[in-house]
Image (cartoon, coloured by chain):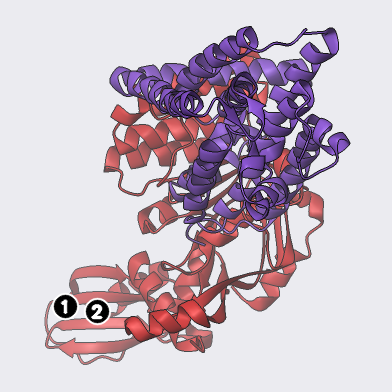
Chain colours: A red, B purple
Amino acid sequence: MTQMSTLDRLSRPASESAIEVRRLVKTFRTARRSPGVRGALRALIAPELESKTAVDDVSFSVATGELLALLGPNGAGKSTTIKVLTGILTPTSGQATVAGVVPYRERERNARNIGAVFGQRTQLWWDLPARESFRILRDIYGVAPGDYKARMREFDELLELCSFWDTRVRHLSLGQRVRCDLAAALLHDPPVVVLDEPTIGMDVVAKEQVRELLRHQVERRGRTVLLTTHDMTEVERLAERVVLINHGRIVLDGTLTEMRERFGRGWRVHVTLTGPDERPCPPGLTVLERDGARLVLGPTGGADAVPTHQALKRIIERYEVMDIRVEESDLEDVMRAAYRDARQESPA
Amino acid sequence: MRGFLPAWALALRVVGLTFRAQLEYRGEFWMRVALGLAWQTSIIVFATVLLGRFPGMGGWSSDAVLMIAAVRMLGHAFYEVFFGRVGELAVLVQEGRFDAFLLRPLPVYRQVQLSAFPSNALGDLLVGGSLFAWAVWSIELEWAPWQIAYIVAALVGGMLVEAAVFTALSSLHLHFPSAITWSYWTEELMTTFGNYPLKILPGVISGAFTFVVPLAFVAYFPVAVLTGNTAGLGVPVAVAAAAPLIGLAAFAGSRVLWNWSLTRYTGVNG
């Protein structure tokens, strides 16, 4: 993602964007503590205050009906950004709007427009069956009885809730609890859904159900979804676009392909020939490794760059091939490279 | 859900829900009720022993002193019923439950109050109500309509003064979890000194209980006005008589402070 395309997205009319974040800054003031008893005493009497910038000049927008993954290592500023967008925190400077509402100025109005799930916390009544929480949330949001029934039926179909929604929340497994939290967050039909690590600690089946629900919400219901996660499979399966954030700053705003291009090492083709072959490489490709009949080829880059399928065609036309295999950098590798790159760029 | 009546209906539904949630732990529920009973009873026993030894206190008859204790304890029970959760706000913040309140389209302060059923207040109400009935029966008053209206206003005012003190303190809970210990200490102070005529204390201390922790406005001043024990109050009688209104004003002020503090909330982990 280039800077130009970020600006291009930001310059969209406000009506097209469900979430707009402009030059957002959130700074926390904390006391610096030196090690040892002496340091602790000094901090007690004459504390040395320091400012920690959790979110530093962050700008991005999410179009209506888009699913955006906000990615970054722990402590990158993702949750702080989410907390500003949900009205929990007030930014130090900058501006954020969600469905046209400034969350920290009109918290209650914003709460009606968003559904929020924090994977590590619940908004359900801990000691009561989840269905009781759904009913009280229905009353809080003023959901009509017919709509409530229809939505519960839909959530049950997608998340298989009825087998455990009469169980007390404290007795639910993590996966069951988060599925109930998702239903609770969507009960009032919010146009914007914000999810902070919703599948953390879930088994693969539960994760897939949650992903299916999210896909359904975006594709069928046209909801805008902002998701933070460390699960790259989730990103790969759900996200149309990612914003990569590190040390409070945006490192990349673009598609997964753009992220792969920038931080991935691209593709490689492993070829086993019928015998040693000294013929030159097809155009657009370069030999990275050669070991007798075995070759590893990669793209030359620049103007001659070829897509994978073209490369395969050219290799097969040029050589007598016994075996051929394409290796692409997986998203975890790309993310690792991206985080490393961001760390090197960061002045900290 | 908007409007006064629907808001109350919803609040009652949530109270019902939290009550049922507490009944899930029957043993703990009864222990909380018993704690409220034991706590308040121990205060009554102490006050009764004290009054038995000294029939008068600072020129006040034992019946009038009993009325101070009764108004304070019943006012405290009402405080526990309607506002008591504010004293434990730091726990909600630390457990991360407070953040969930900010995600719902309801006033945050109201959600704090609706976060748990006040089972301990049942014991407070029982003891406070009984003591109040005893005090009304014992005291020699004509109970003219203005006196009845005033004692009701005094009970509401006492509740509001206590709510104001703990709401103001809980503004600190939003930022400093250890502020909860200040709330505990203040409650201890109010329990220890709130049941007697404050004029028996040295001037500096009774002044502190008037202008710093406004304990005098909870029960001492209203009962002084009601029983005519207005000598040596440390404030003009009109101010003492206005205790219920001062309670209302103090509570309104504490809510402004609380809301201001909420705009600076930074959460438990940034």
For the point 47% across and 23% down, the residue is B52
Would residue A291 appear left or right of A267 to someone viewing this image?
Answer: left
Image position, residue A224 (x, y; %): 62, 45
- Amino acid at circle 2: Tyr
Q: Quadrant of residue A334?
A: bottom left
Chain containing mark 1: A
Q: Is residue A175 above or below residue B63?
A: below
- Secondary structure beneath disc 1? strand
Image position, residue A13 (x, y; %): 82, 56
Q: Quadrant of the N terminus of chain B?
A: top right
For the point 49% across and 71% down, the residue is A259
Viewer-closest of B245 and B174 = B245
Q: Quadrant of residue A240?
A: bottom right
Name the residue beneath numbered marker 1.
A273
Marks 2 and 1 belong to one chain:
yes
Would residue A114 appear left or right of A280 to someone viewing this image?
Answer: right
Q: Are marks 2 and 1 in contact (CB under 8 Å)?
A: yes
Name the residue beneath numbered marker 2.
A319
For the point 64% across and 19% down, the residue is B10
Viewer-closest of B40 and B228 = B228
Q: Is residue B11 above or below residue A194?
A: above
Chain containing mark 2: A
Would residue A184 appear left or right of A174 to someone viewing this image?
Answer: right
Q: Residues within 10 Å of mark 2 (few under 14, many from 20)?
A: some
- Amino acid at circle 1: Leu
Q: Residue furthest right?
A: B238
Image position, residue A90 (x, y; %): 68, 58
Asked if one can make out residue A128 in the rendered structure from this viewpoint, the answer is no
Separation of disc 2 and disc 1 at Cα?
A: 7 Å
